[in-house]
Each structure stands twice: as structure tokens, then as C-alpha cells.
Amino acid sequence: MSLKLNPLHPLFAAEASGVDITKPLSPQMVDAIDDAMNRYAVLVFRGQPLSQDEQMAFTLSFGPLDLGFKKASNQHARLKYKELADISNVAEDGEIAERSHRRIVNNMANQLWHSDSSFQNPPARYSMLHSVVNPSSGGETEFADLRAAYDGLDAGLLAEIEGLEAEHFALHSRFMLGDTDYTQQQIDAIPRVRWPLIRTHPGSGRKLLFVGVHASHIEGLPVAEGRVLLSDLLEHATQPAYVYRHRWQVGDLVIWDNRCTVHRGRRYDLSQRRELRRSTTLDVDRADVHALASEASVVY
Ligand code: OGA
Ligand code: MN
């Protein structure tokens, strides 16, 4: 089988077909998907309903798995593996969550433009989101290509921001949303990290503008100035021309590269069920996986 790619947007994102992702992948297929990711940054696989085990196996072909935000919160375990993020509005008991439930705050935070786990080192490389139940309308996911955002920066602004670094903090988006009830231990669980605003995407060699809602301020600038600059840059990066909007069908798996894209969920009726599952790889070399094995519930 060979991987077929059908572009979904003038700049990035493609539908991928010609492979059964519920089955183990050959090393050649893993390389073909990696190559396609480096070019397109977002790949959509349609009509591939995955069990939790199959999703884990597929994701593990691309590297060790990220726990992300779970390190800072006691999220319920509706799913079988702690490496699967429950991207839903469903509570522990299987019913749609009350509006006051922290799960709904998580839904809201996911509706702000971000790159998964940019608040930690190592951050996330690939996120893989699988659709299980959809609301009747809304609830799409949008993606923006940060390489296109870099290409579109005007020279004056580029000169101003070159060399600047932003601090990223796991709970920044939660604090912004008024969700502040965290213990010191939870606050300290994920140390803050700094990333340059301008980075190079290793997969394509292209430069990109690294912004998103986890960026809390800019090093060396007063907080207010830095935040306004970050918000302007994010607005630039997510202008409609740089955005692909994905309308979910049950059985879709969408993979995105967090090193060069940001994404956000769109509003939907919270009284309707929406269930997706996310698995995420860490941005590390495959050779470094052993250092991470102690935290994991799977064997690398
Ligand atoms: C995620 C996420 C957005 C959505 O799973 O990382 O941000 O549309 N999801 O649910
Ligand atoms: Mn996300």
C-alpha cells in the first residue's frame, strides 16, 4: 500500500489515504507519514474507527507518549490509558458534565489557539485526535500554519521580535479562564519553559512564529507589553488565510505537528455529547525514550 495525499488547503493540511491505520505500520509507512507531516503539518485520515489499543499502537509508531496537562491535574480516568486524553464533555459517570465541572473548563481552554504541551520540555510533537461522537453542529477544530505566519510577517515586526523569547506556563490558560483552584504542588508540577518566538521547524527547515495561549509573557518586556505583543502576533498567525477548519466525522483521525501549528476547538452546544480521544508524542529523538519510561503506563 502506498500513502495517497490530497491537499485540503492552499498552504498546508492534506487528507491521507491508502493505509489501514488500525493495523501495525511498516517502517516505510511510518517514514511516509513523517515525510507527509513535514510537508503538510496536518493529516486527516477518514473512516478509520480505532479502539483505544489501536490508537495507542499507531501513536507509539511515531515516538514515546506525552502526558501533558495530566501532570498538573487529577483528571478522571474514563479511558484505559493515562496517555489518552479524554477530549470530551463527559464526566466520570459517563453522563454529560455539569457546566461547573472542570472538564468544561478544559473544553473552553481547548477553544483558545494553542500548541499542545508547549508549556513543557520536551513539548509535544504529534497530536492524534480521534472522533468518537460529534454534536449535531459546531465543535470543529481549526489549525493554523505557523510557518505561513512567519512568511507573512512584515520586515519591521520581524526585526522587532527576532531574538525574543516567550515563557510558556501550563496553567496560564486556566488562570485566564478564572480556573485558579490549584495546589502549589499542581502549579509546580510542570516547570515553566521559554521558547524563542522565531524557530526553525526541523522537519521542513522552514522558519515559524511560535505563539499560542500557553505563552504568558515575553522575557525582558513588561508583562502588559509582552502580552499585547503576543496577542497581536497570535492574531496575525491565525488570520483566515492561514487556517484549515476540520469538520469532524466519526472515525476520523487527525494528526498535527505541534512544532509548527496551533489549533483550537470551536464552540458547540455543551448539552450535546462530543467525544474525542487524543494521543500525543513527545518531541524527543526515538533514542531518548528510555529516560521517559518510568512515568509511562506502556513499555517503549
Ligand atoms: C486537543 C484540542 C480541540 C478540540 O485535543 O488538543 O485542543 O477541537 N482539541 O477538541
Ligand atoms: Mn490541544
Image (cartoon, rainbow, N blue to C red):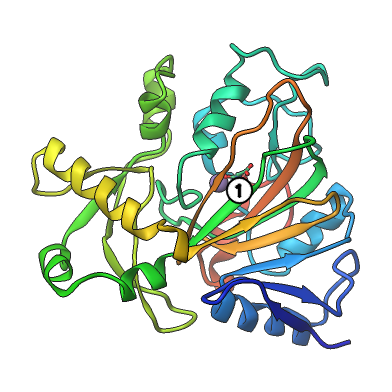
- Count the numbered circles shown: 1
How crowded pointer 1 is (Cα within 10 Å; few <14, some 14-19, many 20+) is rated as few
Residue drawn at the location 41% of the way across and 24% of the way down: 177
* 181 is higher (above) or lower (below) than 136: above
Instruction: Give the position of the C terminus as an image quadrant.
Output: bottom right
Comparing 39 with 15, the one in front is 15
Residue 3 is situated, as x and y percent measured from the top left of the image, at: 79, 84
* 295 is higher (above) or lower (below) than 198: above
Identify residue for label 1: 294
The answer to whether residue 10 of the structure is visible from this angle is yes
Instruction: Indicate the quadrant where residue 275 lies.
Output: top right
Instruction: Indicate the quadrant where residue 205 lies.
Output: bottom left
Amino acid residing under circle 1 = Ser
Residue drawn at the location 74% of the way across and 42% of the way down: 276
The answer to whether residue 300 of the structure is visible from this angle is no
Residue 72 is situated, as x and y percent measured from the top left of the image, at: 49, 31
Residue drawn at the location 73% of the way across and 20% of the way down: 271
Residue 273 is situated, as x and y percent measured from the top left of the image, at: 79, 28
